[in-house]
């Protein structure tokens, strides 16, 4: 008995093509040799890369420090804070995955603190910030 293999159906997927014209020809009122890039996406990728680089350097320099002052006065930590509101989603993502002193950057960026009847541990503060962020209660 012969064995038949059925070919999968062909899919019509949209394809991206890049064409380069010569002599500055124009198409749709823009130079033919240009490529439009989603600037917001590129900026977000750049910001995340910058944040992760600073966080890694900050962790490396302060991993054995127990001094809060040394931890928040580190130049990499300060540069994360200087990123402002754009760093908040990245910080939230990081402290949700692994609670850390990075949560203090949220206090500095937003000017807000978590209110509690007792002194919060870093883990408790991280959980509270993540909950506030996910419920949309953090406003800028």
Image (tube, helix red, strand yellow):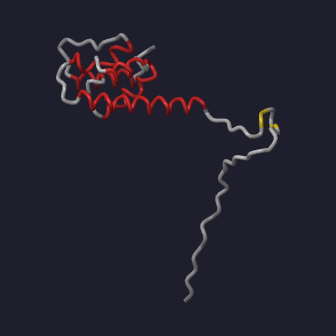
Q: Quadrant of the N terminus?
A: bottom right
- The one of 50 and 132 positioned closer to us in this rendering: 50
Asked whether, in this view, residue 35 is left or right of residue 44, the answer is: right
Specify the quadrant that holds the C terminus.
top left
- Count the labels in the image: 0
Q: Position of residue 114 (x, y in %)?
A: 29, 14
User: Which residue is more in the foreground, 117 or 75?
Assistant: 75
Q: Is residue 4 left or right of residue 68?
A: right
Q: Residue at x 71, y 37 (%)?
A: 34
Residue at left 38%, top 15%?
109
Q: Quadrant of residue 133?
A: top left
| In the depicted structure, whether residue 12 falls above or below residue 67 | below
Residue at image x 41%, y 29%?
A: 51
Q: Residue at x 63, y 35 (%)?
A: 37
* Placement of 127 over or under 13, stated as above or below: above
* Residue 98 spot, x, y in % from top left: 28, 33
Left of 68 or right of it: where is 48?
right
- Asked if residue 52 lies left or right of residue 59, the reply is right
């Amino acid at each position: 008995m012969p064995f038949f293999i059925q070919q999968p159906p062909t899919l019509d997927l949209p394809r991206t093509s890049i064409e380069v014209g010569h002599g500055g020809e124009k198409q749709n009122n823009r130079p033919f040799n240009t490529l439009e890039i989603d600037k917001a996406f590129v900026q977000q990728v750049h910001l995340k890369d910058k944040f992760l680089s600073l966080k890694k350097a900050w962790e490396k320099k302060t991993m054995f420090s127990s001094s809060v002052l040394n931890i928040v006065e580190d130049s990499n930590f300060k540069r994360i804070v200087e990123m402002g509101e754009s760093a908040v989603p990245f910080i939230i993502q990081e402290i949700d995955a692994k609670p850390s002193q990075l949560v203090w950057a949220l206090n500095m960026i937003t000017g807000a603190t978590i209110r509690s009847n007792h002194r919060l541990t870093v883990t408790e503060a991280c959980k509270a910030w993540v909950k506030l962020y996910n419920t949309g209660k953090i406003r800028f």
